[in-house]
Image (cartoon, rainbow, N blue to C red):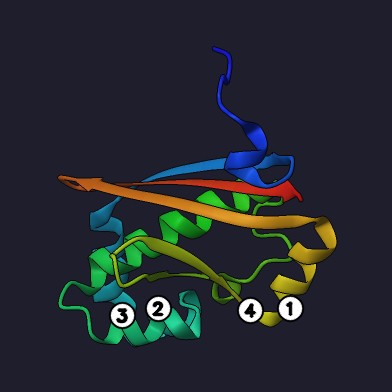
């Protein structure tokens, strides 16, 4: 398939895909984690901005499953796994239009800047007992 639009109009400059990551997770795993460890699981896994949304969530196990799937997709796109990336270094918040948005710790943001990563995109979907996360990291500019 060939792109027939105006590349500069869409990107302003040449952006390249740095990495793509996906994760599929059973929501019941997040629910089991919540039932077994409660707030300790949230404290370990969630970015501080995520934690505020988690505390307001009526479905905490579901929230943990979505959060973990997003983190896993991100580190796969980064190409490192969780080596050098803590669970709470990366998080997901919701924009006012309900779009998921990655948030990063200051240390991870410095690392991403040094790697030339300029944008991080996330899509989340769930159905039945599964949540699916798809992350794309862009470099260039």
Count every numbered label the image shows and give the total: 4
Tell me whether the residue at label 2 lies in contact with that at label 1, contact meaning CB atoms closer than 8 angstroms: no
| Residue at the spot of label 3 | 54
Q: Earlier in the sequence, mark 2 or mark 1?
A: 2
Q: Residue at x 24, y 64 (%)?
A: 62
User: How dense is the environment of label 2, judged by Cα within 10 Å: few (below 14), some, or many (20 and up)?
Assistant: some
| Residue at the spot of label 2 | 41
| Residue at the spot of label 1 | 107
Residue 26 position, x and y percent, is 29, 49
Q: CA distance from mark 4 to mark 3?
A: 17 Å
Tell me whether the residue at label 1 lies in contact with that at label 3, contact meaning CB atoms closer than 8 angstroms: no
The foreground one among 104 and 33 is 104
Q: Is residue 99 above or below residue 78?
A: below
Q: CA distance from mark 1 to mark 3?
A: 23 Å
| Residue at the spot of label 4 | 105
Q: CA distance from mark 2 to mark 4?
A: 18 Å
Residue 111 position, x and y percent, is 78, 67
Front label number (2 vs 4)? 4
Return the residue found at the far right. Answer: 114
Q: Earlier in the sequence, mark 4 or mark 3?
A: 3
């Amino acid at each position: 398939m060939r792109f027939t639009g105006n590349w500069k109009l869409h990107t302003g400059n040449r952006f390249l895909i740095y990495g793509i990551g996906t994760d599929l997770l059973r929501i019941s795993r997040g629910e089991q984690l919540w039932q077994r460890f409660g707030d300790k699981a949230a404290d370990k896994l969630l970015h501080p901005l995520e934690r505020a949304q988690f505390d307001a969530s009526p479905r905490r196990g579901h929230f943990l499953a979505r959060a973990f799937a997003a983190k896993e997709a991100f580190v796969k796109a980064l190409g490192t796994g969780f080596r050098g990336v803590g669970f709470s270094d990366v998080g997901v918040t919701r924009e006012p239009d309900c779009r998921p948005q990655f948030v990063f710790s200051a240390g991870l943001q410095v690392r991403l800047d040094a790697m030339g990563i300029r944008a991080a995109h996330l899509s989340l979907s769930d159905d039945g007992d599964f949540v699916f996360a798809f992350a794309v990291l862009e470099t260039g500019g």
